[in-house]
Image (tube, rainbow, N blue to C red):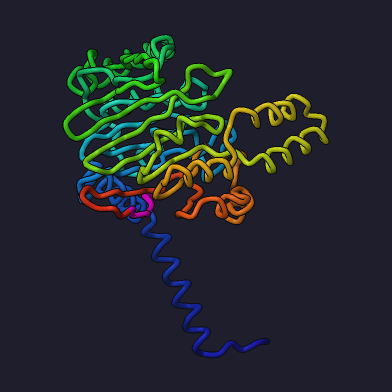
Amino acid sequence: MVKLPRALLVALLALFGAGLLVWFARDEIAEKLILRVVDRAAATADPAFGLADGLHVGLCGTGSPMTDARHSGPCTAVLAGTRLFIVDSGPGSAATLNRMLLNPGRIEASLLTHFHGDHIGGLGDLALQRWVAASAVTPLEVYGPPGVQTVVEGIVRAYAIDNDYRTAHHGERIAPSQGRGLSAKEFTLGPNGRAVVIDSPTLKITAFLVDHGPVKPAVGYRFDYKGRSLVISGDTRASLAVERESKNVDLLIHEGLSPRLVALMESGFARHARTAYAQVMADIRNYHTSPEEAAEIAQRAGVKMLVFNHIVPPLPSRLLDARFLGEASARYDGPIRVGIDGDWFSLPAGSTTIEVGSRP
């Protein structure tokens, strides 16, 4: 029979005792954890709380139709001072926003780059959560190029019965009938391929045409707030318009597709006789931008920092980031980041700094 050292025996007994205490107190512990989550969310109901005045950007979805645990459907939150905007709303956007403590009730408007399903699939849920969280008395405004009216009408019809249930259950005070759903705000691009969507003394949001054909129109957005600037490319081939709009901006958030990795997926699907998937992998390479191309755009435009979103293919581990980037770091001499859900960038007004962090 093996005799344990006294110190080890005491440690094991202590661990056993602690385990018993946790077991018998598990219900109380569970309730305290739930209350802690509620307290944390309620205490940060204002997304701008504790932040310096400026532009703040949260990546609430950095994937594509091919998602992974680190990259969900496309979604970018932009906080200009205290005004919160959401660019694209892929599946799961509202849940990610809540995890990032970005209260959906504070959303002023949603802006769509185009109408692929991975960019609009979470819009209905986003509107629902914004409605109830704020007891909103007006629908969520959705800005987009021609076609946005059709998209909005379809989502409103799809959620109509659900919305009836919410008001019937919670009452007009919590879920006011007039605040349900969405309201389309269609803009028309001028001859120069641009349209000013929001124009106020401190904030200007400009939409600009990009090349995602056969998806037409598709746009990117530029945000200017108190001397700080941001461009979101939307889905696009390498585009001179993105380069033009990104001239000397602080932050460029650009989509990225690795042709090498997608070709590897194509050959893998073909090897297993998944011919339809193999063909899709071949097709998608002609209307996206490679990391190297995006890096060259950022270099020529004088961008201060380049961040990749709409990551194709899925990158379930940081170990794959270098392979995804390829030679991008050699073609752009500024900082590069392969975005993941929860990434947070702060551009304080009156400064040139870019603070990088994350929200859980």
Q: Quadrant of the N terminus?
A: bottom right
Q: Residue at x 61, y 48 (%)?
A: 324
Residue 2: quarter of image: bottom right
Residue 358 position, x and y percent, is: 38, 52
Magenta stretch holds residue 358: yes
Residue 220: quarter of image: top left
Is residue 254 in view from this perspective?
Answer: yes
In this image, 243 relative to 202: left or right?
right
Is residue 340 in view from this perspective?
Answer: no
Q: Nearer the viewer, residue 35 or 323?
A: 323
Span of residues in magenta = 354-360
Q: Residue at x 59, y 46 (%)?
A: 315
- From this view, report whether residue 109 is shown above or below residue 161: below
Residue 276 position, x and y percent, is: 74, 24
Q: Residue at x 48, y 17 (%)?
A: 217
Magenta stretch holds residue 113: no
Residue 104 position, x and y percent, is: 30, 33
- From this view, report whether residue 22 is shown above or below residue 267: below
In this image, 202 relative to 79: left or right?
left
Residue 341 position, x and y percent, is: 45, 44
In this image, 107 relative to 189: left or right?
left
Q: Tag count in the figure?
A: 0
In this image, 166 relative to 287: left or right?
left
Q: Nearer the viewer, residue 171 or 65?
A: 65
Q: Nearer the viewer, residue 269 or 40?
A: 269
